Structures are given as C-alpha cells and as structure tokens.
Amino acid sequence: MQVKETRNDGLKRGYQFTLPAADLAATVDAKLKEAQPEVEMKGFRKGKVPMAMLKKQFGPRILGDAMQDAIDGALKKHLDESGDRPAAQPKVEMENGDGWKEGDDVVVNVSYEALPPIPEVDLSTLTLEKLTVPAEDAAITEALENLAKSAQSFEDRKKGSKAKDGDQVVIDFKGFVDGEAFEGGAGEDYPLVLGSNSFIPGFEDQLVGAKDGDAVTVTVTFPAEYGAPQLAGKEATFECTVKAVKAPKMAEIDDELAKKFGAEDLDGLKKQIAGRLEQEYAGAARAVLKRALLDQLDERVQFDLPESLVEAEANQIAHQLWHEENPKVHDHNHGSIEPTEEHRKLAERRVRLGLLLAEIGQKAEVTVTDQEMTQAVLRAARQYPGQERAFFEFVQQNQAVQQQLRAPIFEDKVVDHIVEQAQVTEKTVTKEELEKAVEALDEL
C-alpha cells in the first residue's frame, strides 16, 4: 500500500492510499486457496473445486472484502504511526469508483480533521472558592410551615359565610357549550380550593363570595391550547351549586405532623429538613464552583479547534434554543436554523472545554464504573414508567445512548479530580447570597 499526503493545513489532513492490483490479486488468491479444502460444489468432491471456478463463484465478494480490509488496515497503520486522532469518522472516497474494474490499482482518498494537541495545565495554580450555607433556623421553620400547609385540613365556616380565596368550596357542577352538556363537564361533591388554579382560568374567581346553598352560573372560555380540541377556545357556562364553604386549617407543627412525613418526632423531622436543605445548598454551590473552574480553564488554555466539531455543536445549540423558544413544535419539520455568532462562540467554549476535560480525565485514568452506569440507566428509566425493561434493552443496543449517559458522569468525576488538585478556600454565605450566585450563572 502506497500512502501520499495530499493536505496538511492546520488540523485538516488528506492522504491518498494506492493498493496495487497485483497485491490485491495475490490477497484474493491466498484467501481462495485457504478456503479451497472446505468448499463443496455440485459435480466436485469436497476440496477439489478448480481455482478458476472458485474465483468465478466467490471472487467478487472476496475481492470486495480484501479491498475493504486493505483500506482499513492501511488507515489504522497510518493513524498508529502518525499519532493522529480523527475528530470524527474519516471520509473515505474511492477514485473512479464507477469506472474501476478488476486489474486496476485501487486509489482511495482519505480526509479528516485531527484532534489538536492539548496543552498541559498546572491544576495546582487554579484558585477556587467553595460556598457553604448552613441550614438556618428560619429556613427550617419556613420548610416546616410549608409542610404544615400541605397537610392542612378544612373546617366548615359559620353558616352564611362567604367563600374567600384559599377556602375550599364543595360543589356540584354541570357544564354546557352552545347550550349542550359536554362529556367530562360535570361533577358532584367536588372539593375545590379557590386560588389553586386547578380549574379553567376564571372559574374559581367567580365562586369567591359564594355562600353555602348558593346557585352560581360561571362563564369561562376554554384556552385555545386546551387538551380537548372540541372545547379549545369555546365559551362555556357551568351551573354550580355550593354545598359547603370551608376554611383552611394548617396542621399543627408537632410530633404528629412529623410522623406523617416519616420521622419519629419533630426533632427528627427538623434534622431531615436540615439535611435536605444542606444537600440542596451543596448542589447549588457545586454548580457555582464548577462554573468558576471552567471559566478559569477557558481563560488559561487555548488551542486550535476542529471546525467540524465546532460547527456541529453550534448547530445543536441553535436548534435547542429554537425549540425552547417554540415549545409547541416537538418534531423537526421546520426550516433550517442558522447558528449565530453567539452560538458559535458558545460552541467553541464547549468544544475546547470538552476536549480539555477529556484529556485531563484520560491522563488521570478517570473511568466510569459499571455500577455508576447502572445507576444512571435506572435514573433515566424512571422517565418511562411501565417500560423500564424495554428502555434497558434499548440502552444495551445503542452505543450513542450509553455515551450520553456516561458523559456527564465522566465530566463530574474529572471536575472532582481537578478540585482535589486546585487551591480551594471555603466561604460561608447566606442562602440569599448563594441564590444570587446561582442566578448569575444564567446571566453569563
């Protein structure tokens, strides 16, 4: 196999591989001779089929296999010797493919973008600040009050009392569109909390001020995007009978409340809440720390980027943001979405940091364990209740999905490795200060 360089421009590489016809023919003959003792064909004893007939019968397929093996082998040898790591699958094109005939040399053009050499980074020079937030008494009290509110009950108001926002009204109702009752538009003894927004917009507002025994006609318009197409955008009237008006009564913050939420007593519930709050704060603080780490790496390390990776990432960013701005479009039946300069800058940052973290992780021998992958698959499977087994099988058969699940685990472990090497100082802040730091992440 003869190899000639045709392009060496930045990270872009081009090579021409030439496989002489004589070498190819010799490979085919050798494979036929190797197979000859085992071949059976009508009219001949096993192993006695003439070479000419073997070549006529099996030659074209073996020739194709030999060509592919030769090209694959030549490419692998070239990459091993050059040390190049293609950023994507190399493009392989056969010259004069339509006009090629047996007996001609095979000429193949190979092109790819090589991954760049990644500069060394002295991780010990990175300076990071780790924010810590203790679970303050006020936050624990607020959480307890929210739990008590969620466990609230309702008690009958005094006879003749008017319903207020936050009260529960027990109603019978029947809905009509164009004077006709519609399916699903009726209910009896329905406990509706006013202000909960659990009914059509405007419905609950018209029951504020109603008393036990009142008959109220509620007129509303179904939202244009309502789930039932036959009702979407239609005006409807509901004949309602108020059967009871009840005031909310927040549960007592005591041992009984604690038991409802799985704790032995109130002190135990407070400890659970404190632990959960500190875990939430730690997660938010880690996001702030990680952004600071990535910002420092992005500022310090510069190298050439494969254009193909940047372009693919910019297109993905533009596509994702377009769908976020157009949430009603769930398919890909839309026009081309051109990335902006802002998309491209973000893509360059992501590609640069992705390559850098991969290099650091590889040198540090960071790996994702089977147990970590299993946990990731289990978490993802929860999104498909009742179809977990089918999801597991899908993941097992799909390398791309496995990589999607593995990538964030690998990145987090590399970040942990970098933090261990960096100079980290701890700073105790308030919950509000942490929230401001997290909000600032979205502004960058």
Image (tube, rainbow, N blue to C red):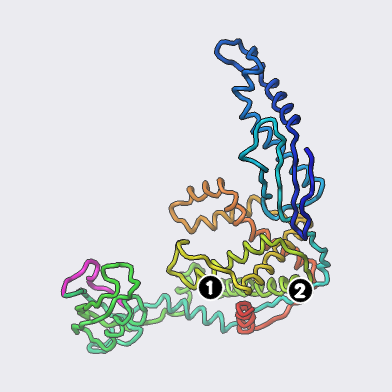
Q: Position of residue 269 (x, y in %)?
A: 53, 73
| Numbered tag placed on residue 198 in the rendering | none
Q: Which quarter of the rendered picture does the N terminus lie within?
A: top right
Q: What element does badge 1 sit on?
A: helix
Mark 1 or 2 closer to N-term? 1
Dot 1, how many residues are within 10 Å of its Cα: few (below 14), some (14-19), or many (20+)? many
User: Based on the displayed image, in which of its 4 quarters is residue 329 positioned?
Assistant: bottom left
Q: Is residue 13 above or below residue 51?
A: below
Front one among 403 and 2: 2
Q: Nearer the viewer, mark 1 or mark 2?
A: 2
Residue 315 image offset from top left, x and y in percent = 59, 65
User: Could you say where residue 441 lies in the image, as x and y percent from the top left?
Assistant: 63, 77
Classify mark 2: residues with Cα within 10 Å, few (<14), some (14-19) or many (20+): few
At mark 2, the secondary structure is helix
**Amino acid type for the residue under numbered disc 1:** Leu
The residue positioned 59% from the left and 22% from the top of the image is 57
Which residue has dot 2 on it?
299
Judged left or right of residue 289, residue 267 is left
Q: Residue furthest front?
A: 99
Please tell me which residue lies in front, 239 or 13: 13
* Residue 296 seen in the figure: yes
Q: Residue at x 72, y 28 (%)?
A: 27
Q: Where 304 sits versus 147, above or below?
A: above
Q: Which residues are magenta?
A: 179-192
In this orientation, which residue lies closer to the viewer: 171 or 378? Answer: 378
Which residue has dot 1 on it? Answer: 269
Give the Cα separation between the discs numbered 1 and 2.
Answer: 45 Å
The residue at the point 67 percent across, 43 percent down is 95
Quadrant in the rendering for residue 16? top right
Taking the image as shown, residue 115 lies to the left or right of residue 100, namely right
Majority secondary structure of magenta residues: strand
Instruction: Give, as a three-letter code, the residue at label 2.
Output: Glu
